Image (cartoon, rainbow, N blue to C red):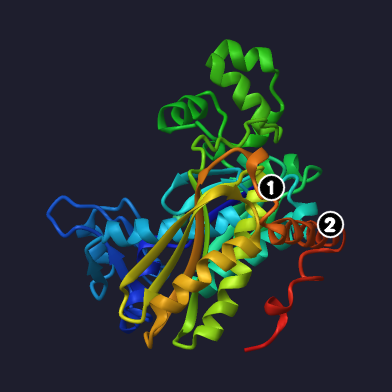
């Protein structure tokens, strides 16, 4: 189980978009007599500024702070980009807010050919590289501990809490670290002489339930590092997509094609893993001046094949390119249909069944030796 939390999210996005703010204390807040701090950067925190603090107090502590009005539309767009990267690792995602989520990575090790820790390290680096903000990651065997772990060495933290050390790790921590312990319960516990989780570890479950009701049972189990809540990813995906932002704009269609291919492979991999096949293929391009172009095409039968995605998208790419510079390319598939109809060969279409066989062979090798080991020629050549 992993918990990922962006570092000073709103402030980090503001600093990304305004390099002149990089070394300044940034406080994101609506400016008003009664407003509070939404987020502040780590430089502002040195002066004692904290989120949820009244803004007038923050200004007193940090008079040189740059106050910036929140741009929620931008933050939510960035949040979507982050989520798209999560989806490359696992479909089991439970967002807690715009900048925070649980990811269940059990069972993904075989698929990605790397451990949960390696996958999360990749994810943190990828978010930093493509989105330009930093995150902190916590890994553990359950939700409560993963969330505590992600907070341990923020910013850019990466912490793991193992099962053997959980009791010892929890013992000195305040009871308010337990999920669901709010101000009222915290007061009640402290008036009963309980301030640390370690003190709860010495109590009987029956006693705790008698005193604190249903919550008593949670206190008993969580204090021992037991939490069997699972990741709740309710929403069923209506589409699957992958995209990449270039470090410098690209005009050459040959290079754009090369960037497109691994995205087709990623989407295909996720289709195959989730047992889905789709009919509508959408190519997405963003120009150097931030105009988004999308080109969709619907097939007569659903597909899971990277090759089909690629072949359908390339003509649209070549038509749309025409001397323009692009900063992003993406490919998506939607209109999920019956898997039984997907990529079935017919008499006129020998190629589809051949492609299906080739991809099945590549998938089998990857399953065994890891994803980097084999690919189609176009994915391997340098630019
Ligand atoms: Mg955060």
Extreme front residue here? 347
Residue 264, quarter of picture: bottom right
Q: Position of residue 247 (x, y in %)?
A: 49, 83
Q: Earlier in the sequence, mark 1 or mark 2?
A: 1
Is 379 drawn above or below residue 371 in the view shown? below
Residue at image position (43%, 66%) is 284
How many discs appear? Answer: 2
Q: Is mark 2 within 8 Å of ligand 1?
A: no
Q: CA distance from mark 1 to mark 2?
A: 19 Å
Q: Position of residue 329 (x, y in %)?
A: 47, 72
The quadrant of the rendering that contains the N terminus is top right
Is 224 drawn above or below residue 14 in the view shown? above
Give the residue number, with chain letter if any, for mark 1. 344
The quadrant of the rendering that contains the C terminus is bottom right
In-front residue for pair 257/171 = 257
Residue 115, quarter of picture: bottom right
Q: Position of residue 132 (x, y in %)?
A: 46, 73
Q: Is residue 90 visible?
A: yes
Residue at image position (81%, 43%) is 164
Q: Is residue 379 left or right of residue 332?
A: right
Q: Is residue 50 left or right of residue 113?
A: left
Residue at image position (52%, 80%) is 256
Ligand 1 falls in quadrant: bottom left
Give the residue number, with chain letter if any, for mark 2. 364
Depth check, mark 1 against mark 2: the one in front is 1
User: Mark 1, residues whose alpha carbon is within 10 Å: few (<14), some, or many (≥20)?
Assistant: some
Q: Position of residue 140 (x, y in %)?
A: 70, 47
Q: Secondary structure at mark 2?
A: helix
User: Mark 2, residues whose alpha carbon is within 10 Å: few (<14), some, or many (≥20)?
Assistant: few
Q: Is residue 162 left or right of residue 135?
A: right
In-front residue for pair 242/190 = 242
């Amino acid at each position: 189980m992993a918990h990922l939390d962006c570092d000073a999210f709103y402030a980090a996005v503001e600093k990304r978009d305004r390099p002149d703010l990089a070394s300044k204390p940034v406080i994101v807040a609506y400016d008003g007599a009664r407003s509070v701090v939404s987020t502040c950067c780590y430089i502002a925190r040195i002066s004692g500024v904290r989120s949820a603090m009244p803004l007038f107090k923050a200004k007193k502590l940090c008079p040189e702070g740059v106050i910036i009005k929140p741009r929620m539309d931008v933050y939510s767009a960035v949040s979507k980009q982050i989520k798209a990267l999560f989806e490359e690792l696992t479909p089991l995602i439970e967002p807690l807010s715009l900048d925070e989520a649980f990811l269940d990575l059990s069972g993904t090790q075989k698929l990605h050919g790397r451990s949960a820790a390696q996958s999360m390290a990749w994810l943190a680096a990828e978010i930093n590289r493509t989105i330009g903000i930093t995150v902190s990651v916590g890994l553990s065997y359950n939700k409560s501990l993963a969330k505590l772990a992600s907070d341990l060495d923020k910013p850019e933290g990466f912490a793991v809490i193992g099962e053997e050390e959980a009791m010892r790790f929890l013992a000195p921590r305040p009871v308010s670290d337990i999920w669901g312990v709010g101000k009222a319960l915290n007061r009640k516990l402290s008036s009963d002489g309980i301030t640390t989780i370690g003190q709860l570890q010495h109590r009987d479950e029956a006693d705790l339930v008698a005193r604190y009701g249903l919550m008593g049972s949670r206190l008993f189990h969580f204090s021992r590092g037991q939490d069997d809540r699972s990741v709740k990813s309710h929403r069923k995906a209506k589409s699957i997509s992958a995209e990449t932002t270039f470090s410098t704009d690209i005009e050459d269609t040959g290079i754009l094609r090369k960037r497109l291919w691994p995205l087709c492979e990623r989407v295909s991999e996720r289709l195959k893993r989730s047992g889905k096949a789709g009919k509508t293929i959408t190519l997405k391009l963003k120009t150097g001046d931030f105009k988004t172009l999308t080109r969709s095409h619907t097939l007569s039968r659903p597909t899971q094949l990277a090759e089909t995605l690629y072949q359908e998208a390339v003509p649209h790419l070549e038509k749309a390119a025409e001397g323009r510079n692009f900063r992003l390319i993406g490919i998506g598939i939607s209109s999920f249909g019956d898997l039984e109809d997907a990529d079935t060969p017919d008499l006129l279409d020998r190629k589809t069944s051949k492609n299906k066989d080739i991809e099945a062979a590549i998938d089998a090798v990857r399953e065994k030796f890891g994803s980097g080991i084999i690919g189609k020629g176009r994915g391997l050549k340098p630019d």
